[in-house]
Amino acid sequence: MPTNSASPDGGPKFVFVTGGVMSGLGKGITAASTGRLLENAGFDVTAVKIDPYLNVDAGTMNPYQHGEVYVLNDGGEVDLDLGNYERFLDEDMSFDQNITTGKLYKNVIEKERAGDYLGKTVQIIPHITDDIKRRIREAAAGHDVCLIEVGGTVGDIEGGPYYEAIRQFTHEENEEDVLLAHVTLVPFSKNGEQKTKPTQHSVKELRSIGLQPDIVVGRCEEKLDPDTKEKIALFCDVPREAVFSNPDVEDIYHVPLVVEEEGLDEHVMERLDIEDAAQPAAERAGWWRDVVTREKSGTVKVALVGKYALEDAYLSIHEALKHAGLEHGVEVEVLWVDAEEMANTHQRRVREADAIVVPGGFGTRGTREKIDAARYARENEVPYLGLCLGFQMAVIEYARNVLGLEGAHSTEMVPETPHPVIGLLPEQYDVEDLGGTMRLGAHATEIQPGTLAAELYGESCTERHRHRYEVNPEYIDDLEAEGLRFSGRANNRMEVLELDDHPFFFGTQFHPEFRSRPGRASPPFVGLLDAAIEKEPTETTEVEV
């Protein structure tokens, strides 16, 4: 961290990142990459993600619409972009760093009901916009630089109050303390020409609400041509040196390297008047480049057996596998397995895999096939990692096929099961609201010495949770008597399971994927790849699916 403050008056600098043309362009990765480079230069960087939807949090949202629900240490259920910020910045975020319209309106209305506004008419301006600015400043306090990503695209009706708040913000702060970066799409025409018209229209929309970008970042298949940069600079009224390329790359962790070559970090530091506080270029942290460009030899195939046929639904698991691959110097090929298709074409992917992961989830869809995947891994000595629901599926499978408890299940899926080996958490019995009411966030687990869990974690671990159901204490003694070891516990709660006579059969009630980082891979994922790399081909046992 710099010895002198990044800002002359001792306050933080603010970088707002907006997007145009279409959503999903990579605003978050662009912002996170900028933050990574600023941290390499010695600055303390944090981030805020603005989601204009009316949900209070992301906890009840369908992964098909919004990707995975990411869980923070404090139990906040947030947008997956917060996960990217944690992975790129290597900083634990808080629920206060995710601003939603639902959260804003809920707070303002509660204050109105309490009489805090003293009879004033409560309006979007100033009450909502003031609350937006307050939250940003509070999140930025104590840091050198705060990145604020505005979800959606400029012109969306939901984003209006946020853009107005940013406009006010630019007037209230010193000019050198606020920077606005606008990320747009620069597509190719059929004749191979890079087209700037979408960018021009997007910036025009931004300027119509009183905001002029300081930087334009063009998302494109290839780097922007010099002529394309000149045209964007001319028609968007920004300096030529303030137009940057963010082309497609094979791995998102290479984006900081690409935009560094473009000089984005140097321009940001110069524009924010903090270049003198930065570490000299030769002394900047280089560990990120060393980790993400590490040479790889060999490929490990991992079958991910889930019910959502899209990567974003299991993004953190995919990234955790990648981090473990970086640590081992191998490429991880994720074989996406639709649980409901296992009986058909997708069963082949399970049999091709060097390891199997069954992720978390809710509901009955695909549970039979997940149980079958756990059985296949157990009986054929295929390395297995069960996460949350995958942990519970392994318990159910063992109860059925080793203890002989026919019909054993979870009361989540089969309330009248004759053997409820998985049941509702006691504190959940009287819960009616679904949002924010699960067992959430970081909780400590004590590890049994002399176990695989102890090899991976040591004496204890603190990992993040998101569940309503747990192993039924009435079945623990019977399960352990037959060889299923619960090697990690939180008081009377079973947190980790393993099998002694298996190369790697490991399950966690918690979600270790949420704390995995490049250069600091999650222990269970490292252990899974350890076993997969050492695994020798064996004769497999048929499992009926």
Image: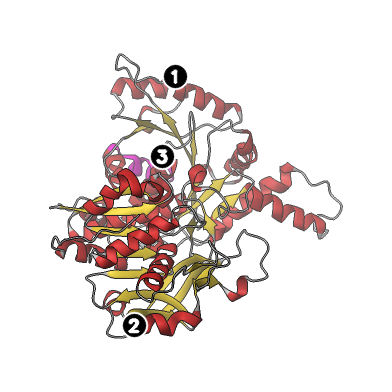
**Which of label 3 and label 1 is nearer to you?**
3
Residue 214: horizontal and vertical position, in percent? 46, 35
Q: Is residue 428 above or below residue 28?
A: below
Element under disc 2: loop
Q: Amino acid at mark 3?
A: Gly
Mark 2 or 3, nearer chain start: 3
Residue placed at 40% from the left, 23% from the top? 232
Q: Which residue is mark 2?
A: 459
Say which label, 1 or 2, has the lower sequence index. 1
Distance, label 3 to label 1, CA atoms, is: 19 Å
Query: Can I make out residue 518 in this image?
Result: no
Let me know if residue 263 is in the magenta part: yes
Image point 21% across, 57% down: which residue?
354
Mark 3: secondary structure: loop
- Quarter residue 434 falls in: bottom right
The stretch of residues the image draws in magenta is 262-272
Neighbor class of circle 3 (other Cα within 10 Å; few <14, some 14-19, many 20+) is some
Percent x, y of residue 239: 40, 28
**Mark 2 vs mark 3: in front:** 2
Q: Which residue is mark 1?
A: 197
Task: Residue 284: give its label.
Answer: none
Which numbered circle lies on residue 26?
3
